[in-house]
Image: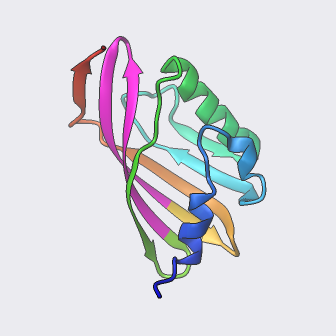
């Protein structure tokens, strides 16, 4: 019987569409680092539950509710880190985009402590808005 790494189990509880539900898995001082020179007004650090909520509410607003995270793979690294590859969908400025993203999660004692969200910025699949 194959078991799931405990940090993967923590991430399976994280719902970017309902950040409030993460209250039991986010450390009080958790930090979300967002790096994207194509969206400089979003770049920066978001701290705690309120910070995570601010980031996801803002990206939801600028994308008019089209932002969707589509995880592809997740690899636990040691006892603290999980590296996730996702392909996110978003519509910005009437362009439907599919963006590869790497997210590194640091999880300690069952709580998300730190996150680095790094989207691809030069190779983005753009499709006409349907």
- Residue at the image position 38 percent from the left and 33 percent from the top: 89
Highlighted range, magenta? 82-104
User: Looking at the rendering, which quadrant does residue 7 occupy?
Assistant: bottom right
Q: Is residue 27 above or below residue 93?
A: below
Q: Main secondary structure of the magenta part?
A: strand
- Residue 97, horizontal then vertical, whole percent: 31, 27
Quadrant in which the C terminus appears = top left
State left or right for residue 11 relative to residue 73: right
As drawn, 95 above or below 11: above
**Foreground of the two, 38 or 77:** 77
Q: Residue at x 69, y 37 (%)?
A: 53
Where residue 79 sits: x, y (%)? 55, 81
The verdict on residue 87 being magenta is yes
Which residue is outermost to the bottom? 1
Quadrant position of residue 37:
top left
Q: Quadrant of residue 91?
A: top left
Q: Residue at x 47, y 24 (%)?
A: 66
């Amino acid at each position: 019987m194959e078991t799931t790494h405990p940090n993967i189990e923590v991430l399976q509880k994280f719902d970017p569409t309902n950040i409030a539900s993460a209250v039991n898995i986010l450390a009080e001082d958790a930090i979300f680092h967002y790096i994207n020179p194509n969206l400089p007004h979003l770049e920066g650090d978001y701290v705690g539950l309120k910070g995570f909520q601010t980031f996801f509410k803002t990206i939801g607003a600028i994308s008019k509710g089209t932002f969707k995270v589509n995880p592809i793979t997740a690899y636990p690294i040691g006892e603290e880190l999980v590296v996730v590859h996702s392909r996110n969908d978003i519509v910005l400025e009437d362009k439907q985009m599919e963006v590869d993203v790497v997210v590194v999660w640091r999880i300690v004692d069952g709580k998300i402590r730190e996150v680095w969200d790094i989207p691809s910025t030069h190779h983005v699949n753009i499709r006409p808005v349907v």
